[in-house]
Amino acid sequence: DTAVSQTPKYLVTQMGNDKSIKCEQNLGHDTMYWYKQDSKKFLKIMFSYNNKELIINETVPNRFSPKSPDKAHLNLHINSLELGDSAVYFCASSQDWRGGAWETQYFGPGTRLLVL
Amino acid sequence: KNEVEQSPQNLTAQEGEFITINCSYSVGISALHWLQQHPGGGIVSLFMLSSGKKKHGRLIATINIQEKHSSLHITASHPRDSAVYICAVGGPGGGADGLTFGKGTHLIIQP
């Protein structure tokens, strides 16, 4: 069984479009994260949610909006896509928000976004 | 904001060699993670530690809180260990601080 899944795996789109990436975890975890990995393979946290509540919101353009319909899902919606948004986006989950950084994180397979 | 430095950036070694990857950080942390990113892109958490030493198979991770330094060791390295190893630290506020990542160490083990 897949612990953390993301869809789609690959996403190729034109500048200016709006797209969503979905993430689901079946581990019963309370906390979920979105990370961005740039072309130099550098990972950076974007958002963190605990039990559907936003905990971390790093300096990310307003065009990025996370949505958590329930604690097992954290989707990422991106408006007006730009060339610089091309990256790999990883979803992750961990057991507990207060221990979020103390707990082991489980990563999804990543979504490779290419904006043309 | 924590600064996380890893060394070396790239490491090529022969099968069987003992490997050490280092990670230093600038500010007190709640925990330190070692992650492995496979050539295919998937990320796996290897260790999470806040003190002392942990061992899993051929992998050993140590941390010195006073010196703000951690090492990841691989004994009897094998070509399947070839991957990018990433150090990440959790801020002192725990989950609310998220993780700050190093730039990774690209390890290649040649047969």
Image: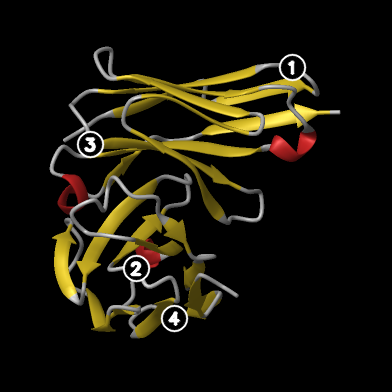
Q: To which residue does mark 1 refer?
A: B17
Pointer 2 residue: A29
Q: Position of residue A78 (x, y in %)?
A: 30, 78
Marks 4 and 2, Cα distance to the nearest angstrom? 34 Å
Marks 4 and 2 share the same chain: yes
Which residue is at 59% across, 33% downward? B106
Which element is circle 1 on? Answer: loop
Image quarter (top left, top right, bottom left or bottom right) of the N terminus of chain B: top left
Of tags 1 and 3, the one toward the viewer is 3
Measure the alpha-carbon separation of dots 3 and 2. Answer: 19 Å
Instruction: State the image quarter where residue B11 is shown.
Output: top right
Q: Residue furthest top?
A: B67
Figure check: A57 above or below A70: above
In this view, the residue farthest toward the right is B111
The residue sitting at 38% across, 35% down in the picture is B102
- Secondary structure type for disc 4: loop
Residue located beneath label 3 in the image: B30
Above or below, comparing residue A12 to residue B50 in the picture? below
Q: In the shown orientation, is residue B66 left or right of residue B43? A: left
